[in-house]
Amino acid sequence: MARKDMRGSRITSIAFHVPDRLVTNYDLERMIDTSDEWIVQRTGIKQRHWVEGDVGASELALPASIEALEKAGLKASDLDMIIFATLSPDITFPGSACILQAKLGCPGIAALDISNQCTGFIYSLSVADQFIRTGSMNRILVVGAEVHSSGLDISNKGRDVTVLFGDGAGAVLIEATEGDSRIIDTRLHADGRYLDILKIVAPASKLNPRVTHEMLDKGLQYPYMEGRAVFKQAIARLPQVINEILDANGYSVSDVDLLVPHQANLRINEMVIGIMGIPRSKMVSNIDRYGNTTAASIPIALCEAVEDGRLKSGDLVLLAAFGAGLTWGAGLVRW
Ligand code: ACO
């Protein structure tokens, strides 16, 4: 349970941004051999937002970050650190947190990139929480942002992956607190033995040269996914980490007011709540409108839940994510 006298951290502001271009399943039907029925049945996705032209993850993160700061009445110069979760950084290096820092105009503060795919937001939240609990920092901007669309194989060969992903960004401000509204706990896990079931092979430092025309011809720059293996792992790991975080903090499933899971696949999330005995009415789902936005999916869903009034002050919120790595994790928040 949260103790009032203990320094902790709290999400004080939240915002998100998606690009204007809407790509429905029917639009995809015109690009590749797929159907709205196949996509909806297997994933719950009806549409996603994709960028147009040359747009990097930091460009989607910027408006979300500015809005989160404005809602809190803060300036970028009030921040101590930016943590940027993404698997689609603007460029290989430097990290997108440095790029966003320059765009926000707050030179000098710490800027950290987190590359933990769909669990990136939970990892970032956990890192921010630790820095604030120790007293080393007071205000951290955590951003999850992805531009998937420029890295997808929009051909029949890539159709299993291409239909899943959307672009977007979510930003939260994490600030020090001594009150009950706080991040109660986070739990992080990974199992690198399964790294081959979801990955991008090239460009890579272990290849010399890192990318060749032959690699590009083979499509090694596109995500490779063993969909069924990923699915099986997700429905095993998510209930495990949910039980772990609830048990460790003396809560049961019935105490949870709202579950905000990573939006990878509606079927995965429905199976997880079935296993856990969580009613459908307590789960936030917006995958139908955004697809899988990876590190951005939880902050986008959380923001919508706040905006539509589903998430109220005092609620116990459970966050849970699973993705490539494999990585998985959970967060428990008293809102
Ligand atoms: N449209 C139409 N048909 C398709 C498509 C498509 N977009 N993609 C594949 N198919 C076909 C296949 O070719 C196959 O045809 P066949 O039977 O003639 O060989 C058939 O559909 C079934 O293919 P499967 O891959 O077996 O389909 P499955 O039921 O496993 O569903 C899916 C695929 C939706 C990808 C599922 O496995 C899944 O959701 N897995 C989890 C994926 C996931 O969550 N990934 C994100 C992790 S998050 C991260 O870290 C980035």
Image (cartoon, grey):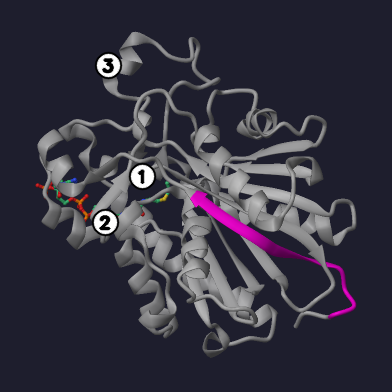
Crowdedness of circle 1 by 10 Å Cα count: few (<14), some, many (20+)? many
Given residues 217 and 65, the one toward you in this image is 65
Indicate yes or no whether the magenta region holds residue 315.
no
Say which element carries label 1.
Answer: loop
- The residue that label 2 is drawn on is 45
Ligand 1 closer than 8 Å to the CB at disc 1? no
The residue drawn where x is 41% and y is 23% is 54
- Looking at the rendered structure, the secondary structure element under dot 3 is helix
Judged by depth in the image, the label closer to the viewer, 3 or 2, is 2
**In the shown orientation, is residue 102 left or right of residue 130?**
left
Three-letter code for the amino acid on which mark 3 is drawn: Asp
Closer to viewer: mark 1 or mark 3: 1
Q: Main secondary structure of the magenta part?
A: strand
Q: Secondary structure at mark 2?
A: loop
Task: Name the residue that disc number 1 marks.
Answer: 166
Residue 186 place in picture, x, y as percent: 67, 65
Q: For the residue carrying disc 3, how many other residues have a C-alpha within 10 Å: few (<14), some (14-19), or many (20+)?
A: few
Which badge, 3 or 2, comes first in the chain's sequence?
2
Front position in the image: 29 or 156: 29
Look at the image and give the residue range highlighted in magenta: 4-16
